[in-house]
Amino acid sequence: MIGWLKGIVRDIDPAGGVLLDVNGVGYEVGVSMQTLCALKNGANAELFIHTHVREDQLMLFGFASLRERAIFRRLTGVSGIGARMGMNILSGMSINELLTAIDTSDDIAIARTPGIGKKTAQRLILELKGKLVEDSDASPAVGSVLADVRSALLNLGYKPAQVDTVLKGIDQSGNLETMFRAAMKALV
């Protein structure tokens, strides 16, 4: 799994993507408008990556902070919210505005995002109210064994909420293999 990339921004697509040159390899990475605004052509950039794998596609989504990536992962764990819609939500409002809208049950503010209707906004609020604040500050550090196990489980198709619950209940002092096996046993 790709969890972090550092390189030179070769091209910026105003629609929400960048071409990142990492040691001569160009990675196309989808980014939110907040992250896009922080990047410049020809400048060095570091992005926390969410690798989105499906049967017919492999996509990379990049974030300026671990907090933004953690919130994206929680958003895409909500039924009916895919990766593109999650990026639209993060592009349509700042993280603080999104957290406030969810905590105050402001479905109208969330529904202003293109592709999000009132019912989807209400479902998002129902599933995430009170959960995003704790997750956004407590995501595992990039490169940590726990982050690698979490990433592997997410890429196997488990829901972020389900994975986070299981990871809290396993012994986190082991190596990657033992932690992964313990998590898989708990999920089965």
Image (tube, grey):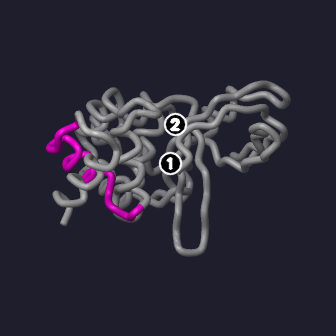
Identify the secondary structure beneath mark 2: loop
Point out residue 133 in the picture as x, y percentages from the top left corner. 29, 31
Measuring 61% from the left and 57% from the top, which residue is drawn there? 59
Residues marked 2 and 1 touching at CB (< 8 Å): yes
Query: Mark 2 or 1, which is nearer the eye?
Result: 2
Identify the secondary structure beneath mark 1: loop
Q: Amino acid at mark 1?
A: Arg
Asked whether, in this view, residue 81 is left or right of residue 169, the answer is right
Point out residue 108 in the picture as x, y percentages from the top left corner. 40, 46
Marked residue nearer the N-terminal end (2 or 1): 2
Point out residue 1 in the picture as x, y percentages from the top left corner. 52, 51
Q: Which mark is residue 93?
A: 2
- Mark 1 lies on residue: 112
Which contiguous range is marked in magenta?
A: 156-172
Measuring 37% from the left and 38% from the top, which residue is drawn there? 145
Quarter occupied by residue 141: top left
Number of marks present in the image shown = 2
Asked whether, in this view, residue 144 is left or right of residue 187, the answer is right
